Image (tube, rainbow, N blue to C red):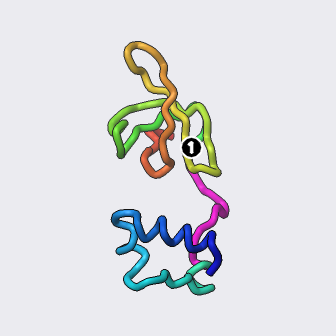
Amino acid sequence: MDADNNDAWYVVRNTRGVTGFVGPGSKPVPLTEAELAALDFGGEVSYEFAEGDVISVTAGVWKDTVGTVQKIDTVRRTLTITVEMFGRETPVEINFSDVKKMWD
């Protein structure tokens, strides 16, 4: 194991709550080819939103907020919506999974 890997393993090992996730023992076990193939590394993203759509936030700190889609970022899987706050339109970034379309 080279110095960079030793440094990375030191950080992982000394981050609270991570070692239980990585697994017991002195070194993590690498993923198999089948496990890697099952992971989604930014393939095709499907979404039902378009700019100008009115959406409702279903989770997080903005839950139950209604906003209008201004921008769609398929790479980060986020929407930028505008919400009214203190009488002004304010942009807010929300994950695709935290919103639903109000109507078609």
Per the rendered image, the range of residues in magenta is 37-48
Q: Nearer the viewer, residue 66 or 80?
A: 80
Snapshot quadrant of residue 18 = bottom left
Question: In terms of depth relative to the viewer, which is nearer, 61 or 57?
Answer: 61
The image quadrant that residue 42 belongs to is: bottom right
On the image, the x and y values in percent for residue 104 come to: 51, 40
Q: What residue is at 55 percent from the left and 68 percent from the top?
A: 8
Residue placed under numbered mark 1 in the picture: 49
Lateral position of residue 55 relative to residue 30, left or right: left
> Is label 1 in a helix, a strand or a loop?
loop
Q: In this view, does 68 lie above or below 20?
A: above
Viewer-proximal residue among 8 and 79: 8
- Judge whether 32 appears above or below 75 on screen: below
Tell me what residue is drawn at x 51 percent, y 37 percent: 93
Residue type, label 1: Phe
- Image quarter of the N terminus: bottom right
Coordinates of residue 56 in the picture (x, y in percent): 41, 38
| Majority secondary structure of magenta residues | loop
Q: How crowded is mark 1: few (under 14 residues within 10 Å), some or many (20 or more)?
A: some
